[in-house]
Amino acid sequence: DSDCVDIQCCETTLEVSGQRIAPPPPLMCGPLTVLQMEIDHGPFCVKVQFDFTLDADEISAEYDKGQLQLTIPYTKEEK
């Protein structure tokens, strides 16, 4: 859910944090046992350090079908 994601930017660091909600189990007849889950649920925080200053006013994000796409331009002085 895009309401559960926060994006922060400070000079050369980008931080994406939020909460993944546990998905409901698939509809099945009988008991369900999960042997391995590739994507965990719960809180998360990812920090990415860049070698250039980020242009925080120009960062854009698009959330579609569980995927977050960020466009991260750098400042004009760094080009």
Image: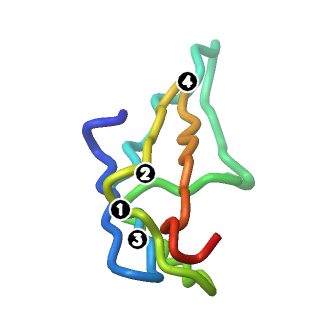
Which residue appears at 35% of the width and 35% of the height? 2
Q: Residues within 10 Å of mark 3 (few under 14, many from 20)?
A: some
Which residue appears at 63% of the width and 15% of the height? 28
| Residue to which mark 4 is pinned | 65
| Residue to which mark 2 is pinned | 59
Do the residues bearing badges 1 and 2 touch, measured as CB atoms within 8 Å? Answer: yes
* Nearer-the-camera pick, 68 or 50: 50
* Label whose residue precedes the other's in the sequence (3 or 2): 3
* Label whose residue precedes the other's in the sequence (1 or 3): 3
| Residue to which mark 3 is pinned | 15
| Image quarter of the C terminus | bottom right
66 left or right, relative to 32: left
4 left or right, relative to 55: left
Mark toward the viewer: 4 or 2: 2
Q: Is residue 34 above or below residue 28?
A: below
Which disc number belongs to residue 56? 1
Q: CA–CA distance between discs 1 and 3? A: 12 Å
* Label whose residue precedes the other's in the sequence (4 or 2): 2
Q: CA–CA distance between discs 1 and 2? A: 5 Å
* Nearer-the-camera pick, 43 or 58: 58
Q: Residues within 10 Å of mark 2 (few under 14, many from 20)?
A: some
Q: Residues within 10 Å of mark 1 (few under 14, many from 20)?
A: some
Amino acid bearing label 4: Lys
Q: Position of residue 42 (x, y in %)?
A: 38, 59
Which residue appears at 57% of the width and 41% of the height? 69
Do the residues bearing badges 1 and 3 touch, measured as CB atoms within 8 Å? Answer: no
Mark toward the viewer: 4 or 3: 3
* Label whose residue precedes the other's in the sequence (4 or 1): 1
